[in-house]
Image: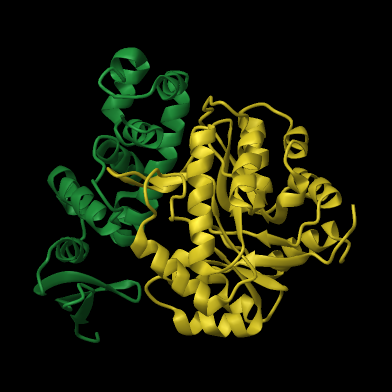
Chain colours: A green, B yellow
């Protein structure tokens, strides 16, 4: 039997399922092994309320990702949130919440769709964070330092406890 | 209702750190998750200067099954350092076996769900050795169950033998989005359970009331908080702010509004 929180979480994380629920709730929940009371409660939910609640969750994810991809999201301007929604509505990472992994997947999609907007220094960072590598070294032409961009060597290092740090070497122009 | 000295405080956030160091309030509420991986020295400093409360966001008391041991240990470590008068969490779930939603999500108001939350609440109390209070959340979802939301909260608190952290803003937002009288809703709660209030301004987005934690406290919220304070023995009111932080003077003005509610300004 699927418990109520698990069933509700499936609806909230999956835009495709919510679209199916809006069209035909009984069929959308047909494969969910629910107790009768839980099924009735879910069928009683208004699809537009589900969308609003899911929107709150997406926005919370976006806030985390925007902190990580600060320059990229600034580059994207007003397009950042719609692009994130388009990606996140149909993709939710399994397991523990991991903003770095989320930022990495979103960033890679951005790179395909509008590569110029994805700051390479941020791409290097999210790719390293999402990997298990112990060491990463990259050269970038644009590394943000006190409001200006400098050429820099980014060095990423991960300890045995899996915490990682970033060092940057750049000319003090 | 007998009036007691009500403490006024703020939710500790890093951007408010310098202002908080001027000791503008009686107490602070610490978000446990903000200190899980770092900041123990700062936490000790704060514990030396203020009465602290420890507030959790991610223990997911409404998830069936055992509590997450790793999170429980981290939460208890924060409690050990902060030595709060009480600890708090939410009547909600944030996580299931499949996914971490990362946000407070409502449970179905049934006796079975009340038992799950209450059992987890008792476990949390036993693990941390501090009294527990539980908070009402805001939600766009209206979920039908065996119990009304107020009966559900009363049942959870009675089963867990814990207090209630009444979030004035969450109550107000829900009342507007779901069209009910917030004062009548409040009066269905067991008043003896209410120990603490949360308050922050609400926002409006496309005609819906939202809990953005980025607005100054509006007059309607002050009026609702005043009614609650008049009819209960609230021990602490915490001003929350997580976005669009104003200057020190504006924060002080917010605290003065709250002191007025308690007849302290």
Q: Is residue B146 rendered to the left or right of residue A44?
A: right
- Horizontal and vertical percent for residue B96? 34, 44
Q: Is residue A112 above or below residue B59?
A: above
Indicate the quadrant containing the C terminus of chain B: top left, top right, bottom left or bottom right. Answer: bottom right
Q: Is residue B72 rendered to the left or right of residue B224?
A: left
How many numbered marks have been drawn onto this rendered protein structure? 0
- Horizontal and vertical percent for residue B110? 53, 32
Q: Nearer the viewer, residue A137 or B124?
A: B124
What's the residue at 32%, 31% (across, down)? A2
Q: Nearer the viewer, residue B259 or A6?
A: A6
Looking at the rendering, which quadrant does residue B22 occupy? bottom right
> Is any atom of residue B56 visible in this view?
no
Q: Is residue A120 above or below residue B114?
A: below
- Horizontal and vertical percent for residue B31? 52, 65
What's the residue at 29%, 25% (across, down)? A17
Q: Nearer the viewer, residue B113 or A136?
A: B113
- Horizontal and vertical percent for residue A1? 31, 29
Q: Is residue A35 above or below residue B24?
A: above
> Is any atom of residue A122 visible in this view?
yes
What's the residue at 34%, 13% (across, down)? A26
What's the residue at 19%, 85% (across, down)? A171
Q: Is residue B211 rendered to the left or right of residue B65?
A: right
């Amino acid at each position: 039997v699927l418990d109520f929180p698990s069933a509700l979480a499936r609806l909230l994380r999956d835009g495709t399922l919510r679209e199916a629920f809006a069209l035909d709730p009984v069929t959308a929940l047909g494969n969910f092994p629910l107790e009768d009371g839980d099924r009735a409660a879910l069928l009683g939910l208004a699809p537009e309320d589900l969308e609003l609640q899911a929107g709150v969750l997406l926005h919370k994810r976006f806030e985390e990702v925007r902190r990580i991809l600060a320059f990229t999201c600034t580059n994207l301007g007003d397009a950042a949130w719609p692009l994130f929604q388009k990606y996140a509505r149909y993709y939710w990472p399994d397991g523990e919440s991991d903003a770095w992994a989320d930022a990495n997947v979103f960033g890679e999609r951005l790179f395909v769709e509008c590569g110029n907007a994805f700051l390479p220094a941020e791409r290097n960072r999210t790719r390293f964070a999402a990997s298990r590598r112990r060491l990463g070294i990259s050269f970038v032409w644009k590394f943000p330092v006190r409001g200006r961009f400098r050429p820099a060597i980014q060095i990423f290092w991960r300890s045995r406890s899996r915490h990682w740090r970033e060092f940057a070497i750049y000319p003090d122009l | 209702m007998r009036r007691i000295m009500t403490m006024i405080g703020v939710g500790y956030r890093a951007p408010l750190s310098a202002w908080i160091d001027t000791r503008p309030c009686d107490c602070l509420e610490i978000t446990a998750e903000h200190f899980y991986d770092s900041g123990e020295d700062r936490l000790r400093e704060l514990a030396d200067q203020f009465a602290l409360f420890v507030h959790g966001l991610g223990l997911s008391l409404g998830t069936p099954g055992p509590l997450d041991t790793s999170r429980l240990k981290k939460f208890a470590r924060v409690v050990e350092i902060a030595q709060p008068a009480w600890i708090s969490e939410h009547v909600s779930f944030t996580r299931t076996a499949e996914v971490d939603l990362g946000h407070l999500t409502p449970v179905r108001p049934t006796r079975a769900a009340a038992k799950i939350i209450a059992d987890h609440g008792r476990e949390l109390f036993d693990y941390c050795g501090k009294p527990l209070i539980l908070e009402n959340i805001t939600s766009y979802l209206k979920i039908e169950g065996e119990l009304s939301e107020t009966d559900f909260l009363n049942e959870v608190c009675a089963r867990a033998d814990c207090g209630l952290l009444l979030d004035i803003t969450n109550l107000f937002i829900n009342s507007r989005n779901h069209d009910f009288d917030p004062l009548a809703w409040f009066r269905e709660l067991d008043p003896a359970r209410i120990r603490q209030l949360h308050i922050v301004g609400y926002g409006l987005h496309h005609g819906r009331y939202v809990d953005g934690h980025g607005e100054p406290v509006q007059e309607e919220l002050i009026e609702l908080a005043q009614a609650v304070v008049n009819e209960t023995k609230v021990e602490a009111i915490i001003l929350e702010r997580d976005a669009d932080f104003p200057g020190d003077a504006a924060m002080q003005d917010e605290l003065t509004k709250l002191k007025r509610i308690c007849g302290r300004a």
